[in-house]
Image: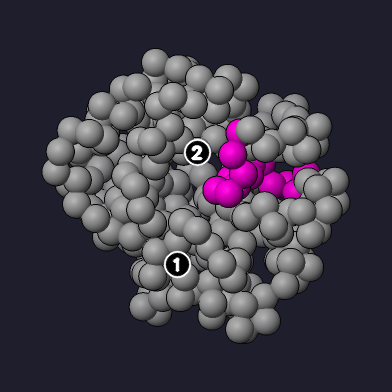
Amino acid sequence: MINRIDRKWLELKKQGKKAFIPYITAGYPTLHDTIQQVKILEESGADIIEIGIPFSDPIADGPVLQEVATISIKNGFTLSKFWEAMKVIRIQTTIPLVLLTYYNTIYHTGIECFTHTCKEIGIDGLIIPDLPVEEQEELQPYLDSALYLIPLVAPTSKQRMPTILANAKGYVYCISSLGVTGTRSFKDLSSIFFLQEVRKHTSLPLAIGFGLSTQEDIQYFQPYVDGIIMGTAIVQHFKEGNRSLNFEVFNKKQENPL
């Protein structure tokens, strides 16, 4: 059976559209809110949703995402409760779901147990920021057409890019710049050169994230990518107590996401 991620990209290609991929932190402020947030995002026109599993020592999260992860943990987040919430979400939607988690969570759960649960519940992909391609050997036997490992490439990945992308599936998460998540300004061509380099090594859809939050950001990257990932701006929207979501706030036109 075709992975939901692949199906979505094919659908978007036929429509001549690009993907809007929002990110939220699981359990912020509660898992009930996570269920509602996924529903709101899908109804607002999201194409793929990335859900971060809170971790006490993240390496890539900026201040906003660190804060909401801490609150989620303090409010009683557990992986077992999360799985139950995901079952509810999957009953309500067929949108592709990608988990962003650190390898420590997978390792302590048990690789086979974690990946089996993902497939059973209907998770379509994993993003693991602290698992370099050279250390993926243990995980690979548990990945298949039902569960993809989404590769991360950064501006510093140039020499390793062919290895990272050799057997990649789903889409490529292109990190716009060095540092942690959060809003920032893009004023030079280095990110564009980076994306052009990534394209040389893969035909997979390219989605760019880390710091994108404005119409200017979207227009800047639109000619070079297949999707836009927004995390901090989306989390901040919910953090401020907003429930309904107008994607014009995030500069996404319904007739053409980007």
**Residue 134: mark:** none
Residue 17 visible to an observer of this rendering: no
Q: Secondary structure at mark 1?
A: helix
Q: Amino acid at mark 2?
A: Leu
Position of residue 230 in the picture relative to residue 84 (left or right):
left
- The quarter in which the N terminus is drawn is top right
Density class for disc 2 (Cα within 10 Å; few <14, some 14-19, many ≥20) is: many
Report the span colored magenta: 118-133
Q: Quadrant of the C terminus?
A: top left
The local crowd at label 1, few if under 14, some if 14 to 19, many if 20 or more residues have their Cα within 10 Å, is many
120 lies left or right of 235 = right
- Magenta stretch: includes residue 229: no
Percent x, y of residue 254: 33, 45
Residue drawn 69% across and 57% down? 104
Give the answer, above or below, for where 150 lies relative to 108.
Answer: above
Q: Which residue carries the number 2 mark?
A: 152
Q: Is residue 113 left or right of residue 168?
A: right
Instruction: Give how far across and how far down residue 234 sits, in percent.
Output: 39, 62
Q: Is residue 185 above or below residue 161?
A: below
**Residue in the image at 31% along x and 29% along y:** 194
Of 244 and 125, nearer the camera is 125
The numbered mark at residue 65 is: 1
